[in-house]
Amino acid sequence: MTQSTGRLRRGILGYGTHVPYYRLQRSSISAALGSGGGKGTRAVASYDEDATSMAVEAARGALRSFDAPIPAAVYFSSVTPPYLDKTNANAVHAALNYPGDVFAGDMVGSVRSTTAALTAALNDRRAVLVTAADVRTGRPGSGDEASLGDAGVAVMIGSDDDAPVIAEWVGGASATGEFLDRWRQPNWNYSRVWEERFGESVYKRLVTEAANDAFKATELSAADIDKVIITGLHGRAVRGAAGAAGVGEVPAAADLTASIGNTGSGHGLLALANELDQAAPDQLLMLVSLADGCDVTIFRTTDAIADYVPDNPVAEQVAGGNDGLDYAKFLTWRGFLDREPPRRPDPDAPAGPPAQRNVAWKFGFVGSRDRSSGAVHLPPQRVSVKGGAVDEMEMVPMADVEAVVTTYTIDHLAFSPSPPTIAVVVDFDGGGRFTSQLTDADPDEVEIGMRVRMTFRRMLTADGVHNYFWKATPVR
Amino acid sequence: MGSRGIKDQVAIVGMGCTRFGEHFDRSIDDMIIEAAHSAYDSAGISQDDVDAFWFGTLSSGTSGLTISKPLKIDYKPVTRVENMCASGSEAFRNAAYAVASGAFDVVMAIGAEKLKDNGMSGLVGASTADDGTKTSVTAPASFSLLAPAYGEKYGVDRETMKEVMTRIAWKNHFNGARNPRAQFQKEVSKEKIANAPKVAGDLGIFDCSGVSDGSAAAILCRAEDAHKYTDNPLYIKALAFTSGPGAGPLDPDYDYTTFNEVSRCAADAYEQAGITDARNQIAMAEVHDCFTPTELVLMEDLQFSKRGEGWQDVMDGTFDLDGELPVNPDGGLKSFGHPIGASGLRMLYECWLQLRKEAPEDRQILSVEKGKTLGLTHNLGGRPGECVSFASVVGSELG
């Protein structure tokens, strides 16, 4: 898969990431179970996050970072897709307010899915948004539980006529092998792995093949590479991969696993994003991904990266986590602890027709602004609350507008997988008010005047329907 | 204001009210039968003398059949009304208009609610198919939004706000301890109230009204006919109702320290009744103390206190049983719980007792002794910024 010559430069136009706010200290696992755990922390998706919501947050971060074109397609990749049968990428599409002629599709199920999405995007001729996110779980006490982590990443792939390419796709190669390394039944909430030395031996051969082919195809050698990013869920194979690829002398990218864990199918792109956050022009970055084979993708940063300002750099998100999450809450959030619910009716699932009628509001947080008075209405109204003008409204996207807390309460009675909930009345900069839940916040830190921004979340799941909508979260 | 009012055109000539509480041994039918027949007995009439019925309930039944079946009403008009927490008052209001119109001679307004049979904590609302974007905020949480906003606006610190809320709960339980119909008939110490587990915001369990079952009823007729039934009727001076645009959750100009619906409703009621100085002219008020911050804000919206001074009046005992203007002398929703459809008529029942000097001696208010003749009842349904509000003024004298 070598880039053909005589075309516009193709590669990464922009990117964004979402590392969840909460961290689990690995030592809390051994403290509770007497085994497992380890040192450091792992990133934990909050109870109201899933792969789709994290993909949305990552994509929003990307779109805030550059003047992004409307892509021709949106791909969603995950090992933990919230839905089967129903396309998860459609929620991402809707949350980004993309028009109907933008294709949305999933590439889900395996860790290699993200490579599939990236490869398809690179081999396309149009702008394509690739999103990837996993909520990584393992059985209590397992290595996966401690060493993996949750995160989302989004990369917009395109050509110079879409937006300036910041990292040109130089080329790469793949090697595929059928062998038993890691597997999971669709209804399992954990993975199984084969004895690790077997996988290590197979990966070693595949890595060597893919790296050799990649260098041949790109007419590059290890000496040309400025940084190598090697990821995969087979830790032992990943540690030996630099040698197998012949890049043992090349500086290795930060793998981030000590603080957030290995975030699964999107981890390679997350680590790449972290490098791009800091990269100078004309650097060669080699992405090596080990997942049921080996995929090597080489990018060269361009002059345009000097002007690229990431909205929320990876390092800041990694450093900004809250490691106060206790293990019991972590288990509860992931469904490993079935806790007594409040003596309240089960919540209702959102109904199909109203959710579809209000898709711009529900998924995109688009309100209406009265042209005559300027009043912003959340949710959108037809009759203005200021002056009563009828149907004088224009749609106004509010998801990226910050707001300030006017009053608030801590609700111990409301249904929540993680009580108590925090309700805030927020007033948006430039107008508009909404009563929202406040998420990723401690009840003690809420105060009148606190600044918040909106974040896309899964409010609840009822009857198998995930209720996606928006919550406020502190500006940190 | 567009309402003309029906001052002194309609009289209340009989009332009934069950005890409120956890009536696990009684059905909604049992409570309706007790309240209705108590009201008939009070007016000295039989069911056959009643020409039409208005029945308020939120969720304990639909249609007039809910009362006509247990009462065996003999093919007469029965209207079931629902207006959230003001449903009982709404039955009373519409029944009064029917008499004032001349359509009927004698009517009954009755409210009832059976909340304790569903086994849930707190009130359970009906669910409608929606898009899942309404932020799920429970009733105590939405009313608790008032407290920090009020404190912020008027410079009342959090501890003082809690003391004010505690004093309201303490006062209403003090009054309820003197009422054999109340759900809770014990005084509760301020310490116990203040230290109770939190439900929402700074609201503890004792800052919230309870959940109970109950029913209350009133017999109405034209004012000129009142003395056919009783020597001591009450006369309707004002009936006001407002339902607003729900601007609070939309409009940043709303500051969560007032219910616009209530202040408009009160102004209308006072104009109908010819009241110019509510705090001094009214003998007593039964107000919708669903949560303690609600009662605080209502003192200002109902013009009993100046803006920003309600908390001080509460602390000064202005609204105590022996205060300048007793508020919720029967113990309020705090002591009675809130069987939705019944509450408005239960409030009216306290006016019926107090203004006619039939309240128990340890609860009889002094303002009536001093010659004041007017009582106010008030309900609101919904939440701060988007609610319906009802206010009535009744009096023991014509004119």
Image: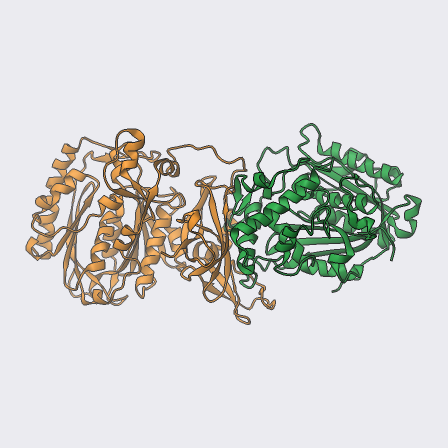
Chain colours: A orange, B green
Specify the quadrant that holds the N terminus of chain B: bottom right
In depth, the one of A208 and B228 nearer the eye is B228
Residue B205: image quadrant is top right
**Residue that lies at the very extreme toward the bottom in this rendered image:** A372
- Image coordinates of residue A209 in percent, x first then y, are 10, 45
Q: Is residue B385 above or below residue A49?
A: below
**Residue that lies at the very extreme toward the front in this rendered image:** B316
Q: Is residue A366 left or right of residue B70?
A: left
Specify the quadrant that holds the C terminus of chain B: bottom right
Residue at 55%, 56% in the rendered image: B156
Q: Is residue A307 above or below residue B233?
A: below
Q: In this view, does A394 lie above or below A277?
A: below
In depth, the one of A252 and A397 nearer the eye is A252
In depth, the one of A460 and A163 nearer the eye is A460
- Image coordinates of residue A218 in percent, x first then y, are 11, 56
Q: Is residue B110 above or below residue B389?
A: above
Residue at 51%, 43% in the rendered image: A414
In depth, the one of A364 and A444 nearer the eye is A444
How many numbered markers are drawn? 0
- Image coordinates of residue B250 in percent, x first then y, are 54, 60
Residue at 59%, 33% in the rendered image: B119
Residue A324: image quadrant is top left
- Image coordinates of residue B239 in percent, x first then y, are 77, 55
Q: Is residue A262 left or right of residue B92?
A: left
